[in-house]
Image (cartoon, grey):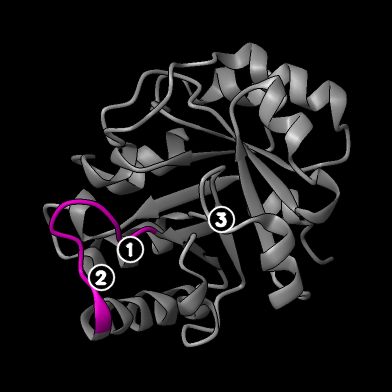
Amino acid sequence: MKESLAEKLRKYFIMGTQNSKQDPVVVLEEAAKAGITAFQYREKGDNALTGARKLELGKQLRQICWEHDILFFVNDDVDLVEPLEADGIHVGQDDLTVQEIRALMPDKIIGLSVSNVREVEQSPIVLVDYLGAGPIFRTSTKTDAKEPVGTAWIASLRKQFPSMPVVGIGGISTENAENVIQAGADGVAVISAITDAKDIKRAIEYL
């Protein structure tokens, strides 16, 4: 039986070199073996790789996802989608519009971040495949993160879009991931819960 998109988004890992003290290739390999179901390549911010080096790392991470049958997304970098043969792209409210991306990539999975009612009302939800809801809790990973919206935002989106896959993001840890799922999320997206974990396998089990 083929897994649904919602099931494939259950344990969603996001990472770039700026998030990991170790080699990202080693971290992703370990996380893939431990059971993540989706991965987003997010190489942006201070000291992030660019150009050929960014593409080369992306190819190495993409290969791991192929080997472990894990969905591979790129974070808002449209130019990387085709060279990396990504399954899809995740965008925020300030990136290229969903309409433009859908026109460019009719067959790719598109994820969109939404953090309040206004963003939902202004977004073409019908054109996306899943929603990233958050930040659910306070996060130190993103310097420009918005104020936390709490698990009530998950419940609100689930009620409004009963069949749309929803992934909680922002400040999610092994301690609070269950609350996010119980609120109605199909999955949890994490960065430091895995990159900073002393035991990656155990951390992913708890997610």
Vertical placement of residue 102 versus 112, above or below: below
Q: Which residues are magenta?
A: 42-51
SS of the residue under disc 2: helix
Which residue position holds label 2? Answer: 25
The question of residue 200 being in magenta is answered with no
Which residue is located at x 79 percent, y 56 percent?
4
Circle 1 crowding by C-alpha within 10 Å: few under 14, some 14–19, many from 20: many
Which residue position holds label 1? Answer: 28
Which residue is located at x 58 percent, y 23 percent?
180
Tell me residue 187's x, y (percent). 61, 39
Residue 105 seen: no
Which numbered dot is residue 90?
3
- Whole-angstrom CA distance, mark 2 to mark 1, is 5 Å
- Whole-angstrom CA distance, mark 3 to mark 1, is 18 Å
Tell me residue 55's x, y (percent). 32, 81
What amino acid type should be assigned to the residue bearing mark 2?
Answer: Val
Which residue is located at x 21 percent, y 60 percent?
17
What amino acid type should be assigned to the residue bearing mark 1?
Answer: Leu
Of residue 202 and residue 38, the one placed in the foreground of this image is 38
SS of the residue under disc 1: helix
Instruction: Give the tally of numbered discs.
Output: 3
